[in-house]
Image: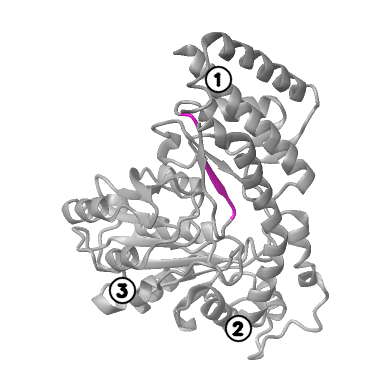
Amino acid sequence: MSKLSSMSQVELEQLHEELLAQYKDFQGRGLKLDMSRGKPGKEVLDHSNALFAAMENYTNETGIDTRNYGNLAGLPEARRLFSEAFLDMPAEQIIVGGNSSLTLMFDTIGRAFVRGVLPGMTPWGKLEKVKFLCPAPGYDRHFMICDYYGIEMIPIPLLEDGPDMDQIESLVAADASIKGIWCVPMYSNPDGVTYSDDVVRRLAAMPTAAEDFRIFWDNAYCVHHLYGANRDHVLNIYKECEKVGTTDRPYLFASTSKVTIAGGGICAMAMSPANLEWAMKNLNVQAIGFDKVNQLRHCRFLPNAEAVEALMERHAEVLRPKFALVLEMLGKELTEWEIARWTNPKGGYFISFYGPEGCAKKIVSLCKEAGVVMTGAGATYPYGKDPQDINIRIAPTLPPAEELATAMELFCLVVKLCAVEKALAK
């Protein structure tokens, strides 16, 4: 029996008064704390300050003057870095871009709408309806891209081993207007789920009514392990597609946005030779070349996969205590109340919190009114609509430990307050 269900009406009212008084005390503190997005904190960013050291020259390993135009697919060493450290794909099948993999995703869908995913295929913009499968809870900016292009989003439950494949296989086999799926296969945003081998194989092999069905494989957290050797692993989707003859199906994305400098990293996408040839033909109209000076700077700072691994372990040393603090406070303050559950991820940037049904928006609103800004409730679902109003994404990475502790103290208080008010309303 939960703490609240065993209380009388009088006891609930007294507890509500106590919690409300504590909340008003927080309101009077003038807090201004930001936990709204998964931003790296200053200590993590400082690990990459060496990027800004003056370079002796701007010529790459093959003699390219990186200050000039050209080399649209990226520097050879940058393509090799993403091949070895992030994507496990042949370097010649990788395009290295600017600072945002989200831009690559946005542009890839844009090209599909205007030109089709391959020569001879109908542009999506000429179709009556385009639909995408959206595992949820998921990354809000994936959903924003769909919304921008007018793509109908179909929520798919995210299970402990990945998206509900029974539902996915049934849908894509029957509906040719379903053109893609968003996937964050390792340490998913926000639940921290890593796709099982079975899920990856089924995604690669499933029959689809749409010939031009595409998997947008956003491997955003592929090197973001919190616990060293105790890490998750995910199968290479492209290699699984090779086995079953669907190599044109996946686009793979990664970036250094949370590895080096969040606003000044480099990104990449990998794909089949046919997809790459078509992408390059279209990119050649859009751009003359991405920032090769930044690519060279990154390759000198991170010359190989071992250097990336060492840097990410330094990140983990900073992040582990923050995640531990959040988990400890949630456990201490809320376990006996039996009103919530939360994830304990092995990597990534978030802890996913599930509170009392119908209370997530109110919890976030009350936190904001007391000076702690969190990701909007519902943001982790298509159209911003969490059907149970239950999920809140906790981002522990930005605030210093002292501020994080204060924010979580308020958060736990507000969760209790909302739960008591819900109990009183029955």
Quadrant of residue 229 in the image?
bottom right
What element does badge 2 sit on? helix
Position of residue 336 measured from the top left corner of the image (x, y, whole percent): 56, 34
Circle 2 residue: 77
Q: Does residue 352 lie above or below 260 as drawn?
A: above
Is 350 inside the magenta-drawn segment? yes
What element does badge 3 sit on? helix
Task: Name the mark on residue 420.
Answer: 1
Q: Are marks 1 and 3 in contact (CB under 8 Å)?
A: no
Quadrant of residue 30 in the image?
top right
Residue that extends furthest to the top in the rendered view of this protein = 10
Relative side of 133 to 208, left or right: right
Of labels 1 and 3, earlier in sequence is 3
Disc 1 from disc 3: Cα separation: 51 Å
Of labels 2 and 3, earlier in sequence is 2
Where does the magenta region start and end?
A: 349-356
Disc 2 from disc 3: Cα separation: 26 Å
